[in-house]
């Protein structure tokens, strides 16, 4: 059995393997999508395919949409070459339930894959063609927090951004420059309206996307590459809208175990690959069943009937509260609190980490600290959401999510996941000194950056754009010598570009330093510190 347009015609074999096939004609959908694009998505990795691709697949199956998604990649072009093209853009969704059952389905909604690469004339020409189409309604994004970043921790433009500014819209490389250049093409083709929808775990993600795209446009205007009318076009949200969203679905790296099961069932070529950019990806995606997507309903050129696939379509304030609930309280902060400790304590699976009595207590503590300041979005109960995470989602042993995946790019998220609650406490009480779980979480992240486990054995950090800089700042902090900690982390903890707030002024910077000092005393110090601060049992 081959995962191709031709291969899925052997319907009986797929049925016997327990894998559902699309109910619509995949090739006809792909053709119509190419001729009349409706929806483009940037960042075409695992969560996009298993969640956003699933939404489109359901709308196609129910006759609510007649075109799929054009999948655009700005960063890791190997994904197009190794995962999309060989499988005719098809993918297998494998949902892993907590009782051990699986739901397997071929998705046919990923109609076309394109490299948004300005140096590739053919691929770039296709992207321009798509953006010129007046019928294009939405462009969505799952490019992670770092995809929107234009500056480093010192507030200055990153080198690749300076190059994009200097080279102008004809030779963009970074994602934000690529998007700005393609909007310029749309502007020149008729200034048609469009919605740009960030679906990444960033606070106020729509505003963040808007700010980065507008910054590129304004820098180009200063240098004469574009005129003021183009900047006004992007600035006018009646033309170009940037809806806010909240997205939630735990999506681990593809499992070799699942790959083996699929191949044993008869599906060929299922093994995961690691691309040159360190993307872990496969022709299938494995993920949990629960999923949430809340979107601000502002689409100036129309939109698909997303609510028919379970998407909450609402106003900005509700999205803001939903995002705050998930990203700063119920899910992401607990991930970011426990995963660094999991790495240091020798865990691999997050489900094992959450079963550690001390770390489970830390999870509850971080969640409860956030619950005291989180607003209720109304459409989803924060308490029910937190309980679902702690009692059902995180402990799911079949999900196979790893702490190493969760700490990937963690520096890009700690400001939102912890900083927002810190700021809320300061606003409410004048200080965040009452916090105990969040200081422990941040200390655990700093301890993780030493890349030495609790027994003193070195381990490899997961990829993160700030690893080199942060480890450089901490290079003189020595495991086994707490006296070596002499203010090296002050530049990190006081950096508002990282946390959104100076943690010393917030009243917890010194406490974080003291916890870290205890955690570097020597072998077993992390475990001892957890016992000290979280109680003596277990």
Image: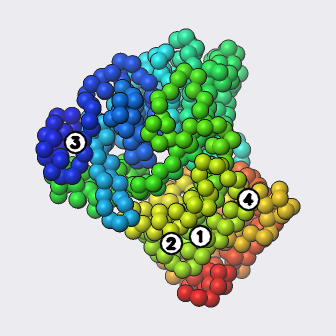
Mark 3 vs mark 4, foreground winner is: 4
The tag earlier along the polypeptide, 4 or 1, is 1
Q: Residues within 10 Å of mark 1 (few under 14, many from 20)?
A: many
Q: Which residue is mark 1?
A: 363
Q: Position of residue 468 (x, y in %)?
A: 58, 57
Q: Is residue 352 left or right of residue 411?
A: left
139 or 256, nearer to the observer: 139
Q: Position of residue 505 (x, y in %)?
A: 83, 61
Q: Residues within 10 Å of mark 2 (few under 14, many from 20)?
A: many
The tag earlier along the polypeptide, 1 or 2, is 2
Q: Residues within 10 Å of mark 3 (few under 14, many from 20)?
A: many
The answer to whether the residue labelled 1 contacts the one labelled 2, judged by CB atoms less than 8 Å apart, is: yes
State the colouring used for the structure image. Answer: rainbow
The tag earlier along the polypeptide, 2 or 4, is 2
Q: Report how far apart the C-alphas of labels 1 and 2 lie in the structure.
A: 8 Å
Q: Report how far apart the C-alphas of labels 3 and 1 lie in the structure.
A: 41 Å
Q: Report how far apart the C-alphas of labels 3 and 2 lie in the structure.
A: 36 Å
Q: Is residue 222 left or right of residue 185?
A: right
Q: Report how far apart the C-alphas of labels 3 and 4 lie in the structure.
A: 48 Å
The tag earlier along the polypeptide, 3 or 2, is 3
Q: Which residue is mark 4?
A: 373
Q: Which residue is mark 2?
A: 354
The residue sitting at 54% across, 41% down in the picture is 312
């Amino acid at each position: 059995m081959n995962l191709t347009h031709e291969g899925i015609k052997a319907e009986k074999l797929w049925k016997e393997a327990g894998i559902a096939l699309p109910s619509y004609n995949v090739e006809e959908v792909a053709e119509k999508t190419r001729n009349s694009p409706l929806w483009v998505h940037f960042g075409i990795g695992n969560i996009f395919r298993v969640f956003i691709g699933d939404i489109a697949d359901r709308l196609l199956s129910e006759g609510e949409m007649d075109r799929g998604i054009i999948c655009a990649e700005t960063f890791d072009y190997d994904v197009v070459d190794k995962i999309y093209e060989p499988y005719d853009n098809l993918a297998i969704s494998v949902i892993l339930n907590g009782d051990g059952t699986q739901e397997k389905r071929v998705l046919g909604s990923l109609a076309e894959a394109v490299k948004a690469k300005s140096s590739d004339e053919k691929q770039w020409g296709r992207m321009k063609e798509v953006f010129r189409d007046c019928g294009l309604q939405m462009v969505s994004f799952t490019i992670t927090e770092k995809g929107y970043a234009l500056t480093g921790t010192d507030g200055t433009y990153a080198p690749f951004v300076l190059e994009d500014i200097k080279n102008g819209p004809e030779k963009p490389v970074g994602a934000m420059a690529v998007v700005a250049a393609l909007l310029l093409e749309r502007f020149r083709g008729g200034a048609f309206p469009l919605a740009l929808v960030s679906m990444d775990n960033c606070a106020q993600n729509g505003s963040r996307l808007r700010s980065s795209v507008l910054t590129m446009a304004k820098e180009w205007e200063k240098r004469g590459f574009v005129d003021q009318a183009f900047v006004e076009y992007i600035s006018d949200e009646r033309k170009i809208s940037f809806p806010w969203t909240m997205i939630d679905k735990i999506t681990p790296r593809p499992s070799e175990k699942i790959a083996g099961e699929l191949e044993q069932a008869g599906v060929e070529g299922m093994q995961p690959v690691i691309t040159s950019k360190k993307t872990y990806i496969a022709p299938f995606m494995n993920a949990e069943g629960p999923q949430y997507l809340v979107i601000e309903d502002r689409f100036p050129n129309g939109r698909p009937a997303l609510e028919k696939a379970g998407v909450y379509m609402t106003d900005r304030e509700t999205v803001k509260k939903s995002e705050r609930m998930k990203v700063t309280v119920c899910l992401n902060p607990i991930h970011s609190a426990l995963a660094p400790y999991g790495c240091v304590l020798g865990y691999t699976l997050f489900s094992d980490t959450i079963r550690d009595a001390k770390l489970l207590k830390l999870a509850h503590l971080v969640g409860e600290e956030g619950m005291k300041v989180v607003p209720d979005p109304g459409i989803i109960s924060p308490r029910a959401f937190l309980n679902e995470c702690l009692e059902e989602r995180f402990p799911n042993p079949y999900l196979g999510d790893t702490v190493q995946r969760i700490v990937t790019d963690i520096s890009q998220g700690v400001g939102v996941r912890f900083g927002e609650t810190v700021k809320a406490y300061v606003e409410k009480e004048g200080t965040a000194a009452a916090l105990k779980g969040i200081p422990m979480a941040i200390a655990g992240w700093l301890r993780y950056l030493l890349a030495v486990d609790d027994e003193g054995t070195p381990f490899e950090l997961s990829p993160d754009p700030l690893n080199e800089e942060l480890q450089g700042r901490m290079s003189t902090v020595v495991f086994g010598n707490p006296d070596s900690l002499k203010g090296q982390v002050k530049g990190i903890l006081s950096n508002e570009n990282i946390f959104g707030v100076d943690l010393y002024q917030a009243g917890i910077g010194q406490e974080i330093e003291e916890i870290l000092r205890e955690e570097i005393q020597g072998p077993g110090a992390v475990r001892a510190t957890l016992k000290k601060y979280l109680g003596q049992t277990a």
